[in-house]
Amino acid sequence: MQVENTRSHVIPFIEKYKPIKGGERVLEIGCGEAGVLKAFIDKGCTGVGVELEESRLVYAREWLADELRDHKVNFISKDIYKVDAQQEFGGGFDIIVLKDVIEHIHDQKKLIAWMKEFLNPGGTIFFGFPPWQMPFGGHQQLFGNKVLSKIPYTHLLPSSIYKSILKKYKEDVVAFMEVKETGISIERFEKIVDETGFKVVHKLHYFINPIYEYKFNVKAKVQSPLISHIKYVRNFFTTCVYYLIQKK
């Protein structure tokens, strides 16, 4: 699913700004099982994947055993803030990818600013994330309760009320409250990009997230230009945004 989505949507989005010719070094932060990274490797890039959950990298190493053997990819099982960039990355990167990750990161401004240190000249950073205020911005679709998992916008309730609902229905209070703490809006993201010395070189807002093609058999749909230009309101009706940024 992630491989196909990256081939069909993420890579073409990046190539609207800058072609990927092969040979680029790609870093994926929060790589999971490395489906996204796999698509870049298939295009001739070499990759490094950083993932906090070692259990997910077990599958990644099995799946990409040939690429590991051929030194096309390397994995680091660590919190991104604990990685020694100079020692463990082995150089800078032409493309850094954070897909469905920035909304889970604490101190997002710190991370985005830090990435300058290992981004090669002319390099770009790709972000794909759901705006916090979108219908399921709190990842409620992952609730164990089938009814509750289908109710939109519950994550926007005041923290005390939301927490009591999570407790009542025996959901993972810590995990879902953390998502509430780290969720990010379009406006906040763009502000952080500017304040950390980056500029947006390409962006695309989706009414229907491209990944829904594989999850729910619903075709991706770009957000209307009118909605995309209405600050704050757009967050409530945009299920996914793609951004490509570069140093100013």
Image (cartoon, rainbow, N blue to C red):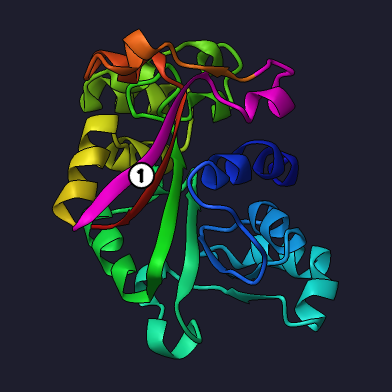
Is residue 141 depicted above or below 99 in this figure?
A: above
In percent of the image, x 48 and y 31: which residue is there?
171
Q: Nearer the viewer, residue 162 or 153?
A: 153
Residue 66 on the magenta segment: no
Q: Position of residue 127 (x, y in %)?
A: 43, 46
What span is in magenta? 197-219
> Hey, which quadrant is residue 204 in on the image?
top left
Residue 71 placement, left or right of 230: right
- Count neighbours of disc 1 (C-alpha within 10 A) and say few if under 14, some if 14 to 19, many if 20 or more: some
Q: Nearer the viewer, residue 97 or 135?
A: 97
- Residue occupying the far left of the picture: 195
Q: Position of residue 175 (x, y in %)?
A: 42, 43
Badge 1 marks a residue whose secondary structure is: strand
Is residue 78 depicted above or below 230 in this figure?
A: below
**Circle 1 sits on which residue?**
201
In this orientation, does residue 106 appear? yes
Residue 150 placement, left or right of 130: right
Residue 109 placement, left or right of 10: left
Q: Nearer the viewer, residue 176 or 231?
A: 231
Q: How many marks?
A: 1
In percent of the image, x 29 and y 20: which residue is there?
156
In this orientation, does residue 84 appear? no
